[in-house]
Amino acid sequence: MKEYQQYINGKFVKSISSEVTKVLNPCTEEVISLIPKGAIEDANRALEAAQEAQLEWKSLAAIERAKYLNKMAFVIRENRVFLAKTLAKEQAKIISLAQVEIDVTADYFDYNAGWARRIEGEIIQSDRRKEHIFLHKAPIGVVVGICPWNFPFFVMARKVAPSLITGNTCVIKPSCTAPNTIMEFIKLIENIGLPNGVLNFVCGSGTIVGNALTKSPITGIVSLTGSVFAGQKIMEAAATNITRVSLELGGKAPAIVCADADMDLAVNAIVSSKVIFSGQVCNCAERVYVEETIYDEFMDKISKKMAAVKVDDAFADNNPDMSSLVSKDQIDKVEEMVNYAKKEGAEVLIGGSRLSKFDKGYYFEPTLLANISQNMQIIQEEVFGPILPVMKFNTLDEAISLANDCEYGLTSSIFSENFNKVMHASNELQFGETYINREHFEAIQGFHAGWKKSGIGGADGKHGMEEYLQTKVVYAQYK
């Protein structure tokens, strides 16, 4: 069994706290590693190291900083199979999807390295003679990144890559549930020559380590991917020093299926968007609205598709579609929400229970629910599991209204062959992303950002990179 240490100022060091957290393989419930519980002193040491390293780091030409990102991408690709197996083992992500996460993470480092020669300022016209107004883009300083357990490795890169290319240094807090892949990555990049203190990793709870990282006056911006509750706590802590925050929080993505949709395409895309990583993805299709005239046909097709979903160990040879949920807490929550939906009148067409064929692990059946109304908990609150409630609608405007009736605003989708309908919906849906006739999954060159309680700021592309920059205006009067 592996035991990890904190990584501070270019070295693995013991935590101030002697306590550890057990990391489990969700498929077997076996303890696979131990990580430090972490202490406030660990957080402060990491922040001080990052602060000291930042002055020299930002003085490097961006193209020099980019070389380190390219090296990270190279190391990931050289160890892609090992990293994918590590990821699958710690979080029950099917091995094929784990491999995708590892490969896209390497691409993400290379993509952000490509911004080195494209970070631009502006020259603004002055009202005065013989004056230039220069708008510069400058690094914020020290970035704190708090990572989730569902895409821990990719989201780590989502915070590290744009931070480093823009001249910031980083302190990353991995998830206590799935830290292993990140910790192995640190070992692998130890020899790339990254200056000490530029990148630090501190394990520990959100209430202790996360809170200390967020409240510190050293921290310039906190980037969190997590729950709404976690985001609220981050905002409260960041308020102490008016620290910037960038938050990607929960989602309750609606999928609208119109009568003129390609039904097979819609069914395949929605099921794919629901069972990816067992439904534990913030942009998963969480609720479906189907036009009444095609409802019966749609339900017949999606029932067969959901029933055919293969569930097995993450490493199974039969190429399963999904595996175990990540933890006991997660499966307990999903089961409780399904049971409550039944009490509210929902009808279970497919699934609805834990999978009894597994002696160990947190396996839940892919579940399809009918007889749903808009005020049900299962429609209003994020499930984060393989549960799909379906409702009818009569008009597109009604469907849009139902979709918008939610405190979240991350992703959404519509299926229709009518150009006017999809353009109308994409304009009226109150979500940071809308997918048209495709599954829910973003691109690294886009901008992944939520509305309402789904977050503040965003990630990916040019706009995601600029989250880690601040502006400085220089008024230059000359004779």
Image (cartoon, grey):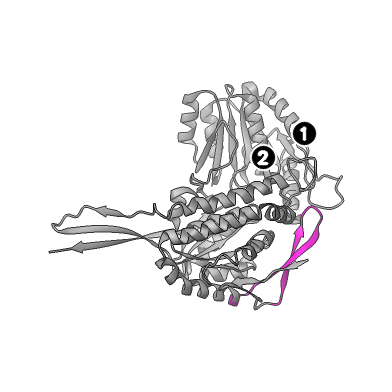
Q: Which residue is mark 1?
A: 307
Residue 449 magenta: no
User: On the rendered image, what quadrant is the N terminus found in?
Assistant: bottom right
Mark 1 is surrounded, within 10 Å at the Cα level, by few (under 14), some (14 to 19) or many (20 or more) other residues, namely some
Q: Which residue is mark 2?
A: 274
Q: Is any part of residue 225 visible from this angle? A: no
* Left or right: 30 in relation to 202: right
Residue 30 magenta: yes
Q: Secondary structure at mark 1?
A: helix
Q: CA distance from mark 2 to mark 1?
A: 13 Å
Q: Secondary structure at mark 2?
A: helix
Amino acid of disc 2 = Lys
**Range of magenta residues:** 18-41
Q: How far across and down, in percent of the image, does residue 354 sit?
A: 81, 46
Residue 347 sits in quarter: top right
Q: Is any part of residue 200 visible from this angle? A: yes
- Is 313 in front, or is 296? 313
* Left or right: 137 in relation to 335: left
User: On the rendered image, what quadrant is the C terminus found in?
Assistant: bottom left
Amino acid of disc 1 = Ala
**Who comes first in sequence, dot 2 or dot 1?**
2
Instruction: Indicate whether 418 appears above or below 142.
Output: above
Residue 135 sits in quarter: bottom left
* Left or right: 107 in relation to 20: left
